[in-house]
Amino acid sequence: RVSFSVEHPVDTLYDNLGNTVKLFKVAADADVPVVWASSSSVYGGAANLPTCESERGNVLPKSPYAMQKYHAEDYAALFGQLYGLKSIGLRYFNVFGPGQYGDSAYATAVSAWCHAIKHGQQCRSDGDGEQTRDMCYIDNVVQANMKAAAVLLDGCSWSDLGRCYNVACGDRVSNNEILAFLGKRFNERVQVRHAPERPGDVKHTQADISRAQEELGYEVEVRFWAGLEATLAWWDLS
């Protein structure tokens, strides 16, 4: 996760990048195509929103985690050239949904807030709460993975050198908007605790998903607010 990588930049370099490169080499040797998880963090808080894939590199990543994902993309392309690795990297934006627990250090804001409401705890809000995210419901992510795998298995040449795609909804919502909605929905059960802005976090994310739509056939199946309702139901909070 971002905060852990800030605290442990060397250890996470070996874990995240070193092991990913090992996986790429094994897959290349076995002639097995790879769909792998990159991240929207490679954009480093891009100035242009919505952000298209070509924006990568205009702003450097803001955390060791993001830099490791950034260079994993370079290795995927390099291994395509050197060893014939066929791969697609999916730049997930903020993934949420049922099955994501909120008491983990890897929890997203949505799952952490659902956990807090369920257990009578405070909802932590970092910074001024005006940061916005392109929140992507899990069903969209599953669809993107399946379609990327199908494209690779069909042998499309443009995917052979580590092509990457945004996986998101193409819109964004602020932490304050979500907390306001939860506050109206659950009244006094929502108690907000303000915390400092986290090092390495970007202020805004929003994806341009046109490349994934055109080349993978990806479509947004579930928008944020519908996904939030499904998530609240899974937490038995509806």
Image: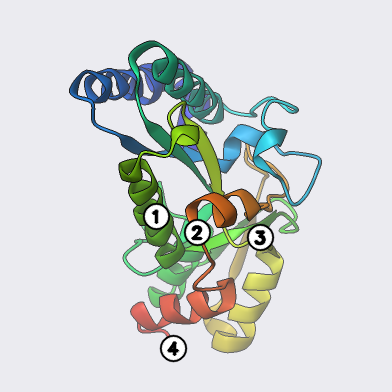
Q: Quadrant of the C terminus?
A: bottom left
The disc labelled 3 sits on which kind of residue? Answer: Gly
Relative to 50, is 31 above or below? above
* Foreground pick, 227 / 181: 227
Which sits earlier in the primary sequence, circle 1 or circle 4? 1
Residue that numbered label 2 is attached to: 217
Closer to the chain start, of discs 3 and 4, is 3
Residue 56: image location, x then y, percent: 67, 31
Alpha carbon distance from label 2 to label 4? 33 Å
Q: Looking at the image, is mark 2 or mark 3 earlier in the sequence? A: 3
Would you say 78 lies left or right of 182 here? left
Residue 167 seen in the figure: no
- Marks 1/2 in contact by CB < 8 Å: the verdict is yes
Q: Percent from the top left, x then y, of residue 28?
A: 27, 21
| Type of amino acid at the residue the image marks with label 2 | Gly
* Secondary element at image label 1: helix
Q: Which mark is residue 170?
A: 3
Q: Which residue is mark 1?
A: 147
Badge 2 marks a residue whose secondary structure is loop
